[in-house]
Amino acid sequence: MGSVLIVDDEQSLRFTLEAFIRSEGHSAFLADDMASAIALVRESPIDIVVADIVLSGSSGLDLLKTIRQIAPDTRVIMMTGEPTLDTAAEALRLGAFDYLQKPVLKTQFLSAIRNAFNARRIAEEENLEYTIRLEKLVGERTRALARSEATLRRRARELAVLHNLSREVGASITVNATIEAGLNKIALATGSDLVVLFLRHEDHLIQRGYFAGLRGIEWDHASGARLGECLRGIAFNEDRPVYCEDIPADSRCTLNVCKDAGFGSLAAFPLRTGKEAMGILGLLSIEKRDFKAESAFLLAVASEMSIGLKKSLLYEQLQHRASELQASLEKIRSAEADRLQLQTQLQQSQKMEAIGTLAGGIAHDFNNILGAVIGYAELAQNHIERHCKAYAHLNEVISAGVRAKNLIQQILTFSREAKHSLSPIRLEPVATEALRMIRASLPSTIEIRQTFSSQLAVVADPTRFHQVLMNLCTNAAHAMRKRGGLLKVSISDFFLNPESASNTAVSPGTYVKLTVTDTGHGMSRHTMDRIFDPFFSTKRKDEGTGLGLSVVHRIIKNLNGHILVRSKPGKGTLFEVLLPAVDAEVETYPEPQPIPTGTEHILLVDDEKPLVQSLKLQLESLGYRVTAMTCPLEALDAFREAPSQCDLVITDLTMPQLPGDRLAKALLEIRPDLPILLCTGFSTSMDSKSLAAAGFRALLYKPVLKRQLAVAIRQALGERQPACLEDLFENAATLTARHRS
């Protein structure tokens, strides 16, 4: 189990919270001021700190700052008896995990403790997973560096040989002295059994020296050969190195001196001074040997042997070797840059974790605001004729509100990796809605051209596919932002036969293909190799995070699909997404019926006054009698006085004094058959099972549209019992389409 530190200057509260902690099996530490709390954090492994905002002689926010510095993995929960929005916002900004109001109920307190432990465990698991991936990448980089180091060491050894050879032949004055010094060094450096040097004399190559190597092979063949005769003559005439791995079997070897001496392999290199060929350097080996694999080094040796005629060749060779050394150093610098990039990615991952925590905190309040906006817009439509421009303008307000709700859900989905329900869908309606949104944000210099011809369905989540298309189109638009261009989006059916599939990593079968093409600046091969890497971006830091295409890639892979990209600099870019087609019925939505109404009495409970007023007016416009209250305790007292006069209750989840689930429990104890709807801006703990267990008939996410609310009420009152609670959920695109109709 874990350890929890309680910091409060009120002794009785410390003892009470200590008992709560120990009842869960955790270790509890107590402190009454900031100094003793910091000392305990430094001395003991503390998992969670629960601290009061106001401490004797100091501030709980100062304690929060200090703990975030000395123990960043420790979760801190702040408490206060006099909460203000500024204080709560400041605590969350400084890194507080949660914020509780005194008096703290045991269930509320332990729920916060469990959430903190769960968040810590999840963070540790994610950090461990990322560390493993990071270690793997570091291992790969380390092995690459080791290979580069081996190459560098080999190059260094070769450079050392060349330097010694240059020094030896450079110190020699006569040709004979140069040959003697050079052949000795070459034989030892290359491991050849025999090194021979021939110089041109008229139309012959005459042997001027040899060195027999460590085996002490006897060689006294002083006769020459005509130009073009045997392997050395071919190398001279064609001015190129000649290699032979099997002398006895090579028909080019017309002289038998090498065969008779028992040599198996040979390499012949022309010796030059500028444009003039001066001779041949020959290397021979008893065993079969691939001299060609060492050609770069051996050519350098041959060049050094030409130093007696033109010493400038030494400078050119060293320049060549210096460039290779520079390339090796560049690889080392590149590896170091990759290491720093991985470190940056780790920091960015930690930022995303913090964003996830913040997103959950603001979702509830933001959806409440959207609820009021959409509610009053729908109420305004009740007083306007449908053919008026104002009615259409209000339609746009409502649609924008629904998209804002969907945007909040996408932020929560991305930051918390929520699960998505998959079902057979057609891609065209989702693509049409996405392109309509994109069109509104693009300059007039970018033309959108769409072609939808698919007749098949895929198994996917509409929201995730919407995210895929938005990311691909946004990147395409960014590539054309300076000069404009054409953005083409097409959806078609595609069959990949086994023969064509054999040349790709895609399995044969029938697919629905999404194609997104732009006429922007295109990409290089290096960029295309990395576009799906997390946090890789060619944009400026203030223009993108490098997450868009990595998210697209992850979504497509989770759907057993494939994503392909083709691009050239200056020629635009083409993305192809292949999703497996399925033979299944796609859910269709009938034409919207008139919004159902009623005359029942509804008790409405929500702590947001503007939202309560908006919902009250909406319900009254549907014919219902409404009692609206902002205090759940007062609502409970009012219900106790006349439980039979209420036909249905609509309640928020997150409310001060009494949360919606506890209010529902109390109401059902009084009247078990009471229909109750839960209407909330954000919840991570409520699903179908927990809703049913709490006694709720349905869950409505704010902002809720008038039609959605009206249908849910009639269903809860028993006019049509849904097959499951999910029947009452509708995605944002569907709601927008129905509202426009």
Image (cartoon, rainbow, N blue to C red):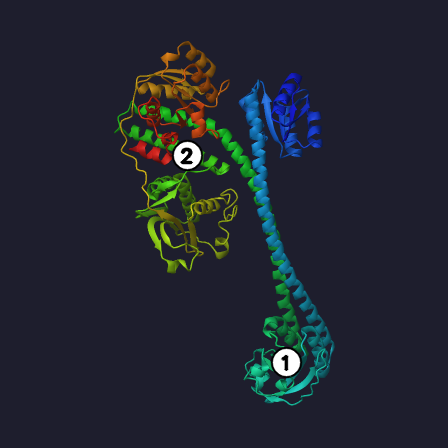
Please tell me whether mark 2 sits on a helix, a strand or a loop. Answer: helix
Q: In the picture shown, does residue 643 fall above or below 515?
A: above
Camera-side residue of 151 and 192 = 192
Q: Where on the picture, by quarter, is residue 366?
A: top left
Q: Residue 274 at what x, y percent from top left?
A: 60, 78
The residue sitting at 56% across, 36% down in the picture is 122
Q: Kindly report the distance in space between the C-alpha atoms of the residues bearing marks 1 and 2.
A: 77 Å
Q: Are marks 1 and 2 in contact (CB under 8 Å)?
A: no
Quarter containing the N terminus: top right
Q: Which residue is under mark 2? A: 406
Camera-side residue of 249 and 327 = 249
The residue sitting at 67% across, 88% down in the picture is 221
Please tell me whether mark 1 sits on a helix, a strand or a loop. Answer: strand
Q: Residues within 10 Å of mark 2 (few under 14, many from 20)?
A: some
Q: Which residue is under mark 1? A: 282
Camera-side residue of 393 and 418 = 418
Q: Residue 27 at what x, y percent from top left?
A: 65, 27
Residue 365 seen by the camera: yes
Residue 631 seen by the camera: no
Quarter containing the C terminus: top left
Q: Residue 602 at what x, y percent from top left?
A: 36, 17
Q: Residues within 10 Å of mark 1 (few under 14, many from 20)?
A: many
* 95 with respect to 424 (left or right): right
Instruction: Say how many tags the image has.
Output: 2
Q: Residue furthest top?
A: 641
Query: Which residue type carries mark 1?
Result: Gly
